[in-house]
Amino acid sequence: MTLSFPSPEFDDAVAAVCHGSATEAEMRALNVLLRSDPSARDEYLMRVELHTRLASDRDLFSQAADAAAGCRLPGISPDDRRNIFSLNPAVPATRRKLVQALALAACLMFLAGGVWTLWFRRSATRNGATSSAVAMLTRAVDARWGGKSAPLRVGSALGPGWLRLESGLAQVVFYSGARLVIEGPAELRLVSPHEAICPIGRLLAEVPEPARGFRLGTDHVNVVDLGTSFAIDASHGRTEVHVFKGKVELLPGTRARQSLSESEAAVVQGNAPPRLMAASAAAFTSMFEFQQRSLASAAFRYEQWQFANAQINQDPSLVVHLDFENLSGTDWTLRNAAEKNRSVQSATMVGCVRAEGRWREKQALEFQSVNDRARMAVPGDFDALTLSAWVCVKGLDRKFNSLFMCDGFEPGTIHWLIRNDGVLGLTVVGPGPGKFQILASPPVLTLDELGRWLHLAVVLDGRSRQVVHYVNGDPVSRQALKLGPPFRLGSAELGNWNPRTGPDPTPFLIRNLSGSFDEFRLFSRALSDAEVRELYAKGKP
Amino acid sequence: MSADSTHRFGNSSAAQQQFLSLFLRSEQEIFRYVAALVPNTTDAEDIVQQTALALWEKFDAYDPALPFTPWACRFARNKAHQWIERRQRWQALLALGLAEELAQRRQELQPEFELRLKHLEGCLGKLPQGQRSLVEGYYYERAGIETLAERSGRTAAATYKMLQRIRHTLQLCVEGQARPEVP
């Protein structure tokens, strides 16, 4: 048997060596080839190295480990968690064997303790680094927070863990959409976007349709929401559950589940069966008022934004305005709301899902998968451009996360993006092949900003030859532009990029955004700092 | 294991702790060094295990001022050679100086490998779910090929082939990522 390189036989032989299934003839043939052909040898080493990494770098599969740990967590108290981690089977086989071998050799079983400790410490660090926020603090009145944690401000992203509200009122919105108003003194443990535990305190929960199935646990009972508004008053001795709208399901300890409908309430105490009574909204007046006040102020902001829009839509330099209002499940068209300039009739959405925007009345378009995009064609040549968007970024999954990108790398086109390190970038493509300029801000988006509505804008001014990036109305970088007009956009996409490089785009060309847009504007002129600030001020949630 | 080392093992938990912490820190490196010669995971792990015992026996001779990994890799090299000598198939693969050449060349290529393989996690994330669970099953869970074949409804041969294809996809991906890209 002889092998040549490159060849399918070579591929199979290398794979067989990795799997331990190669025959002696295959191995002999490989020996001859690898000794005579340096490129085959290097390729062999690369493949073996990749295989070896997969087999030895446990961190590569941190998601798998987290999923394995995560799926066992619900319903288990924090004290039990430690045990779960140390019983986690995610210990490399080598290490298990090593422990056995060393322990056996010296009859010292306690060695294992040292190894477990080391392993536990490693996995704990890793879990800490990858944990992500599950909710956001959206509103607080006279809130005093307990515990050692840094003072919480409205807009903070909240990771899994304890919130201790000593007094006052606060609203927490989970990423699933569930909203809780809590009244101090209260203790709330955020578990996931779909689950929280409240051993002590009073809270009012409002769970919209997409968050159905939201779980709230106390010492005595788990409440599974079925699309409702309900309240809980929990202490260590007893839990009251009041349902104001819809239906919930009670899972009291070891007893059978029981459903609770509108206007019903139940008291769960010790091991006794739940005692039914009528729901009392009066007991939760302060929280209802708080909720209404916050709704009223949000509704006011939304109206103010609509009013401002009517004016801005009259601006002759406004080429595109997508407000993502009136999205329907069947229509793939996004209407351009710019009134004085009709060169772009509409944009087309591909994939994407409807989501809630800056206000609960406001719709947004969420980009999740690698295929999601909103496409448009913008004809014409421009001396200057301003792009403005309200976005809620969920994560910077890609090296380049597209905000607005023209297809390919055509002369005069632009790519507006967020880099995975939080840098805002505008790439301007020049006339010759390989000519382009990257105008990048410092890293301005931190983890803190993820999950919040942000106003991002960039001004590309061909006359004064400068590019300015803005975050929430403030300029964050101002740079000289070396490439002059005309700028052309042509076919372009929000939230994704069409590389136009043939039928088989390799994986590194994927630049989809993970997050939502609830407004996009394109102007054919350079807006001033003051104008950008006003766009932000008129639209801030 | 000698009576002397058993004695020391029993009395000195500080040495134990020191050895374990050094060894665990170097374990991946040692495994990769061995696996460059004997890529089959189970066999490579056996060799690493024998290396660990040899290292512990000779831990007295280790000079803490010197880095642990190169010292350990010398033991790993000897253990690997002893292991290969007893197996005709592997001898056929690594005979006539190829073992030495592979170890040497691997060291030269290390920076290049690092450059590419730092993208491995990202590339794993891009695999379709079915492929990802197969990779996880084989490399992370260390499930046997029959188990994996049964889970996916494929034959064992098809499962091996699938793993080969997935590694190919991952290799293309990490190599693509390592090339600089215009934003």
Image (cartoon, rainbow, N blue to C red):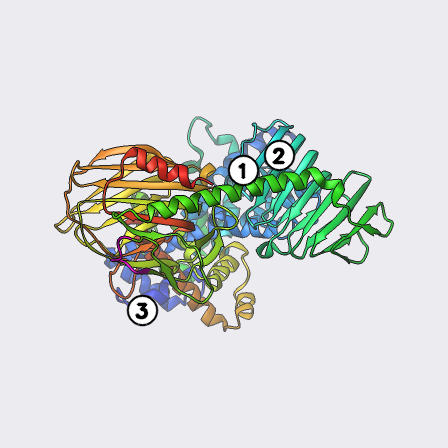
Magenta-tinted stretch: A340-346
- The local crowd at label 3, few if under 14, some if 14 to 19, many if 20 or more residues have their Cα within 10 Å, is few
- Residue closer to the observer: A6 or A340: A340
Residue farthest left in this picture: A432
Residue A225 in picture, x, y percent from top left = 68, 54
| Numbered disc 3: secondary structure | helix
The answer to which image quadrant residue A508 occupies is bottom left
Badge 2 is on which residue?
B9
Instruction: Name the residue beneath numbered marker 1.
Output: B56
Residue A299, given in percent of the width and then of the height, sits at 52, 44
Distance between the alpha carbons at the discs numbered 2 and 1 = 9 Å
Quarter holding the N terminus of chain B is: top right
Chain letter for the residue marked with disc 2 in the picture: B
Where is mark 3, residue-wise?
Answer: A8
Q: Amino acid at mark 3?
A: Pro
Q: Find residue A305 and report its horizontal and vertical position in percent.
A: 43, 44
Mark 1 crowd level (few <14, some 14–19, many ≥20, 10 Å Cα): many
Foreground disc of the pair 1, 3: 3
Query: Does B131 appear above or below A522?
Result: below
Say which residue appears at 55% left-offset and 36% top-offset: B20
